[in-house]
Amino acid sequence: MVSRLKDLGSQVYGDLASGKYPYVEIPSRSVSNIQYDKKLKQYVLGPERVKRNAKNTKHLRPFSQLLWIAFFSKHLMMENKTSTLRDIYYSAQAYHVDFEDQAESDEIITELESLVGSAREDLNIYPEERSAIFGNLTIEYNVPGYEGRKLDLTSHPDGVMIGPALTTSSFVKTTAERVIVIEKGALFTRFIEEKVHEKYKAVLIDTAGQAPRSTRYLIRRLRKELGLPIYIFTDADPWGMHIAMVIISGSANAAHITDLTTPDATWAGVWATDIKKYKLPSDPLTEVDIKRLYELRDDPRYTEQIWKDQIDEFLKSRRKSEQEAFARYGLTYIVDKYLPDKLRELG
Amino acid sequence: MVSRLKDLGSQVYGDLASGKYPYVEIPSRSVSNIQYDKKLKQYVLGPERVKRNAKNTKHLRPFSQLLWIAFFSKHLMMENKTSTLRDIYYSAQAYHVDFEDQAESDEIITELESLVGSAREDLNIYPEERSAIFGNLTIEYNVPGYEGRKLDLTSHPDGVMIGPALTTSSFVKTTAERVIVIEKGALFTRFIEEKVHEKYKAVLIDTAGQAPRSTRYLIRRLRKELGLPIYIFTDADPWGMHIAMVIISGSANAAHITDLTTPDATWAGVWATDIKKYKLPSDPLTEVDIKRLYELRDDPRYTEQIWKDQIDEFLKSRRKSEQEAFARYGLTYIVDKYLPDKLRELG
C-alpha cells in the first residue's frame, strides 16, 4: 500500500517536473456507476471515471485535499500508527489543509479508497466502533511492539476486542470448524457462558449491531484463509436481515472496495418463519419496518429465494422478534435447541 | 448476595406459613427522598420507605414481579450465569410472569437493587455496553472455567473488554501508579500506540461515552484496592464534563447504590479554559449545550470551585472542543505535551 501511495506521489511530481498540470483519475462513485455484480454478489463500480485536474481551478481544492490524505496516510503506515476519521479532520489543520467539516474529509478519504481500491483500514484509518471475537483460534500480532506475540482468543471470557491489532494479525492455528456471527453482545456473552465455542467448535463474533468494516474484513479472512463456514444470527426484523446481508454482499457505499464481502456466508436466523415455528414473543412491525421491507424487496442483493420468502413472511405476519426472545423458553434454549436445529437444517 | 436473597425468600415463606400477608419495605426512590450527601459527594436515598404488601390487591402485581426477579437472580448466581436487562424481560414469559414491556421489568430490577442496596451487576444482571481497559495490571478470573487463570492487561493491544468476567476478577499485581480514564476509543487507541501506559505508568480505561456502571465500579475498585489516583479526560463540553462527574459522584437514578462512585477522582480536562490556553479548534455551543450548562450550575454535585469556574468559562467563551482537537498540533501532541502538563498541574 505504501508503494502505491508513493507511485501516486511520483506521478504528480513527475508531471510537475515536466511542466504539466498533475491530475488523477478516480473510479466514479456516482449512482449511475454503481452496479450490482451477480457473480460477486455485491455492488461494484462500473467503468466511469472522474478526472481531478490541477489545471481546473475548481478541482484544485479536492485535488490538494486528496494528495494530503494520501501523504498523511503514508506517514501513518510508515510510522506504524493508526488514526480515525475524526483525528484526520483535526490533523489537517496542523498542515493548514482546509476541510469545511468532517463530512468533507470523510468524503476525500472515501475518494482515496476508490483511487487505490482498498478500504481505509488498509490506509491505517479506523472507525471508532468496536466488536469482539472469541474462540479456539490463536493469532499472531503484526503491530509494533507485539510482533510475533501470540494470543489465544479464548484468553478473555468477555471476548477479545476487534481493533487495529486484531484486524492485522495472522491466524496461527485453530480447532474451530465454523464461525458464528451474532448481532448482539448479550447473546455473544450467553454463547460464551454456554460454551458454544466448544460444543459447536465455533469462533464467535459479536458485531454489536451493523458490523464495522474491519469486522467484515475479518469475517472474510476467516472464510478465505481458514475455509470456515460462516453463520450469521440476527434479530428477526428487516434491520437484522440487512446486517446479515451487508456482511454477505456489502453495501452500495463501499462499492469501490471488493474485499469486504463474504458471498457464501449464511443468514441462519432468526427468520420471519422462526417466529411462528418457535412461537416466539413478537411485536407488530412498525410503518418504518414495512417501508424498509418493500425497499429490500426491490434490492438486487435480495434476489435469492430464501430472502424473498422471508420478506414475504414478514409482510404477511406483520410481526418481528428479537434474538433474546428465545429466553422465553429459558436462557439456554437458544443454545440447546435452536442452534443445533438450525445448523442441522442448513447442513 | 445469594444469602440476602434467600433471607428475603425465607421472610416471605415465614409470613405465609404463619398465615400472614407477606410484605417488603423498600427505600423510596421518589424525588423527595433523593438527597445529595456532601460528605459522600453523591446522591443517596433518605429515610422514606415504600411498603409492598400482598394484602393490597394493587400491590400484588409488583410484589410478585419483585419476588420473581429475586428468584431469577438467585438462580443466575447459583448457576454462575449472567443475564441482561433484555433477557430478563423475555425470561419472565417462561414463568408466566407478566411485564407490560421492558421498561416495567427494568423498573422492578431497580427496585430489587434498592431493596438489597447493591447494583444489578452484583445480581449477575449486566447491560450491553462495553468499555475497555489496558495496562500493566494482572488480573485473576473468578468466573467458572477460568478460576485461577490470570491475564496481563497488556496482552491485547486493542484493549481488554470490560464485561462480567473482568468486572468480577481479582487484582493480582500492578506496576501502575495511576489510572487514566478516557471518554473516547480513538484516544484510548492513540494512548496505547504512544505507550502512555509505560511512559506514565498508567492503567488506561476507555469508557466509550458515558461510563457503564460496571466500569464505574471497576474504577472505584482501582482507587480503593490499589490506591491509584484516577484522572478523567473528556471532551470540553457540558456532556464530557458530566461523564467525569458521574464517575466521581454518581447519578441521581443510582442514589440507591453507594458503591459506584469515586469521590476523589479528578477531572483532568479537556477544560473550557484549555480551549483558549492551547488554542484548540472549537465549535460554538448550541442552545442545548447552554441549557445543559445552566442545569449543571444548579446541580449540587457541581459546587466545588473548579466546576463553577469551568461552567462560567464555557458560558463566557461559548465554545466547546473535542479531545481529538489536539491532533491539530500533530497526533502525539496530546501525549507529549498536554498530558504531562496536566499531570504536573494537578500534582
Image: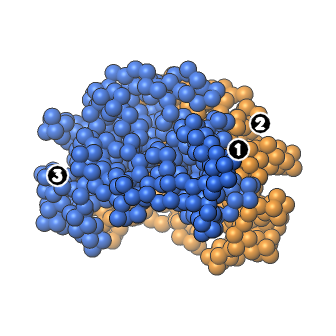
Chain colours: A blue, B orange
Q: Quadrant of residue B21?
A: bottom left
Tell me the residue that label 2 is attached to. B200
Q: Residue at coordinates 62% horizontally, 60% vertically from top-left? A: A54
Q: Are marks 2 and 1 in contact (CB under 8 Å)?
A: yes
Q: Mark 3 highlights which residue?
A: A304
Judged by depth in the image, the label closer to the viewer, 1 or 3, is 3
Q: Is residue B14 left or right of residue A6?
A: left
Residue depicted at 15% across the width and 34% down the height: A347
Indicate the amino acid at tag 3. Glu
Q: Mark 1 falls on what kind of element?
A: strand
Identify the residue at image location x=41%, y=48%: A257
Left or right, A345 with respect to A284, comes to: left
Query: Residue B196 location, x and y as percent?
Result: 72, 37
Residue pointed to by mark 1: B180
Q: CA distance from mark 2 to mark 3?
A: 56 Å
Q: Is residue A148 visible?
A: yes
Depth check, front residue: B6 or A87: A87
Vertical placement of residue A67 versus A203, above or below: below
Kindly report the distance in space between the C-alpha atoms of the residues bearing marks 2 and 1.
9 Å
Q: Position of residue A44 (x, y in %)?
A: 34, 52
Find the distance from the CA under tag 1 to the CA under tag 3: 51 Å
Q: Which mark is residue B257?
A: none
Foreground residue among B166 and A303: A303
How many residues crowd mark 1 within 10 Å: few (<14), some (14–19), many (20+)? Answer: many
**Foreground residue, A217 or B160?**
A217
Identify residue type, mark 2: Tyr
Is A81 placed left or right of A106 in the picture? right
Q: Position of residue B58 (x, y in %)?
A: 33, 71
The reply to whether callout 1 and callout 3 are in contact (CB within 8 Å) is: no
